[in-house]
Image (spheres, rainbow, N blue to C red):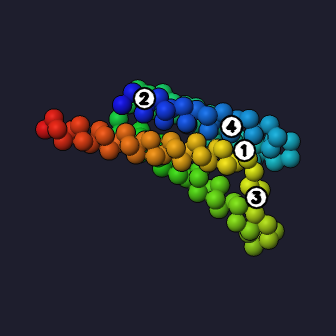
Amino acid sequence: MRGILYAAAACTAIGGILHLIMAPRLLEFNVAGGAFFIIAGILQLFWVLPTIKQYSNIFNYVGIGGTIGLIALWAITRVPNPITNRGGPINEMGIAVQVFQVAFVALLAVIIAKGRRTERKVV
């Protein structure tokens, strides 16, 4: 179980670091976008602690929900919008972030499922 916890923490940490790496480029021409990447990156790095320490399943559910929100936001912004008729670029960095975020969600789901199985055995 510790291995899964560390893997999930590593996935969210890497996703956060990649978000922070992308922020300076965006800050040059889009301050709001750059600020979003800074906030998202910091929150993902913060989430390493509740993941490793396993505070409670509430933190796991919030982590899953927030990360799914980031994944959905990325997907929505890749679809052409009615104002510009263009979607955002799909590049290597964006795909790498999404891979780590999807892995984080999957690993947290495994952690929750294993925790439920352990609780049933105890009761």
Disc number placed over residue 3 in the picture, else none: 2
Which residue occupies the extreme bottom position in the image? 82
Tell me the CA gap for discs 3 and 2: 35 Å
x and y percent of residue 81 in the render? 74, 69
Labels 3, 2: front one: 2
Name which residue type carries label 3: Gly
Q: Which residue is mark 1?
A: 93
Disc number placed over residue 19 in the picture, else none: none
Residue 39 seen:
no
Tell me the CA gap for discs 4 and 1: 7 Å
Tell me the CA gap for discs 1 and 2: 26 Å
The first of marks 3 and 2 along the sequence is 2
The image shows residue 40, relative to residue 49, as above or below, that is below
Element on which disc 1 rests: helix
The first of marks 2 and 4 along the sequence is 2
- Looking at the image, residue 88 sits to the left or right of residue 117; the answer is right
Who's the residue at 37% across and 39% down the image?
111
Disc number placed over residue 88 in the picture, else none: 3
The first of marks 1 and 2 along the sequence is 2
x and y percent of residue 104 in the render? 50, 42
x and y percent of residue 1 in the render? 36, 31
Which residue occupies the extreme right position in the image? 28
Name which residue type carries label 4: Leu
Q: Which residue is mark 4?
A: 18
Residue 26 seen:
yes
Q: Are marks 4 and 3 in contact (CB under 8 Å)?
A: no
